[in-house]
Amino acid sequence: MQNKRNATIAAVVSAVVFIVCGWLLLRGGTSLETFPLNTLKPQGDKAQIIFDLVLWVFGIAALVFLLVEVAIIWMIYRFRRDPREKGAAAPEGEPEPVQLHGHPSLEIAWTIVPALVLAVLAVFNVRGILLMDDVSDDALEVTVVGQQWWWEYRYDTNDDGVVDIITANQLVMPAGRDVKLSIQSNDVIHSFWIPALNGKMDAVPGRTHPLVLQAWEPGIYEGQCTEFCGLSHGVMRMQVKALAAKDYEEWVGLMTSTPDAPSTPEAVAGQELFVQQCASCHQVNGMEPGDTSYEYTKLPNPEYGKSVDSPLSSKNAPNLTHLMMRDTFAGSLLDLYEKPATAVVENPSKPNVNNLKRWIRNPEDVKPMDPANGQGMPTLDLTEEQIDQLVAYLLTLR
Ligand code: CUA
């Protein structure tokens, strides 16, 4: 009786778990707004391939599960102990049940059938893997570099072998077009993951891993580093901002042009401060650390961005030339504007000055870092006046 009850409980529990999983899968875990890291709401070709595979695997698993459950319940019923029986022996006058020692045909069957099931799944799997690698000829190529704790993106928009756009955290790309990423790392192993657009890909020092993204529609797609990479791994976020084709061209135009020079006295003072305090880590194209005669008209160093070991200053810190063209900063942890990102070229809302000040005032208050070991941004102990000047300058970088 005890065994029968246990078996029944097990069957009921697994059926409930199964039904809940199926319900979650079909419901797709609700919307991307509520759950932005949702693999069950594919928003592009590659994510759709993964989702289709999930449905096939889950469908076949569901069939196997149902057959096994039915067999268990039938066997519990069919081979239950006779209710009149108290001891182990058969009741008086009734024959002993047939004593079996193995059942070759059954054993062969339950070895071959699972192998066949796995073979069928392997066909779908291999097909999926091959489709994931497909990339169209007109694909945009972007190099992605994992850093502690943010993502760098390098574009060579005119295909001349020289990087002409370097930005951070928010990967801007055209919707409807394949984007071929070359994923690298500058320090430890990270993992790049935009669930709505594709699966995960590790960023490993010394290696380049390919990944293709494609988004059907313009939109914002959230991501998160998924390989433990140190103190701020848990808040190492990223975003894809997919723009309509003509908006993307406009973005490229703005990103490859020169920001207006600061005009207010406050912003000019901020620029001087930037050169002294920030330029040894953060690059603004054309600016060298300590170079107060800095001119915006200088082109970025053509060598910059060709390899992770670029000699220029912006190796461990984001390039800030067009900071205000992004919607987020600090590893996508803080909003740069008062309203969150939307799929438009420039965020129409007001800059979030408080977030910028908070970050400059004490970065380690925002996220855990270890600047003494070259991991993350140090606290510069600036006065409030200096912080205001610096922010006034940063706001000109668009
Ligand atoms: Cu980068 Cu975890």
Image: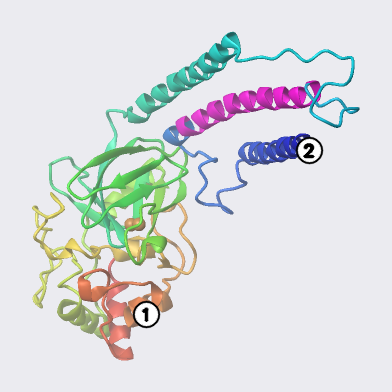
Which residue is found at the position 55% from the left and 49% from the top?
32
Position in image of residue 326 (x %, y %) = 35, 60
Residue 66 falls inside the magenta stretch: yes
Q: Nearer the viewer, residue 225 or 280?
A: 225
Q: Ligand 1 sits in which quadrant? A: bottom left
Position in image of residue 147 (x %, y %) = 26, 59
- Badge 2 local density, few (<14 within 10 Å), some, or many (20+)? few
Left or right of 38, for residue 369: left
Q: Secondary structure at mark 1?
A: helix
Which residue is found at the position 39% from the left and 37% from the top?
214
Q: Nearer the viewer, residue 265 or 222?
A: 222
In the image, the segment drawn in magenta is: 49-78
Give the residue type that dot 2 points to: Arg
Residue at which label 2 appears: 5
Q: Nearer the viewer, residue 99 or 285?
A: 99
Q: CA distance from mark 1 to mark 2?
A: 64 Å
Q: Residue lying farthest top?
A: 105
Left or right of 228, for residue 53: right
Instruction: Say which label, 1 or 2, has the lower sequence index.
Output: 2
Depicted 107 relative to depicted 34: above or below: above
**Residue 370: which quarter of the image?**
bottom left
Residue at which label 1 appears: 357
Q: Nearer the viewer, residue 280 or 108?
A: 108
Give the residue type that dot 1 points to: Lys
Which quarter of the figure is the C terminus placed in?
A: bottom left
Whether the residue under disc 2 has CB within 8 Å of ligand 1: no
Which one is in front in this view, the residue at disc 1 or the one at disc 2?
2
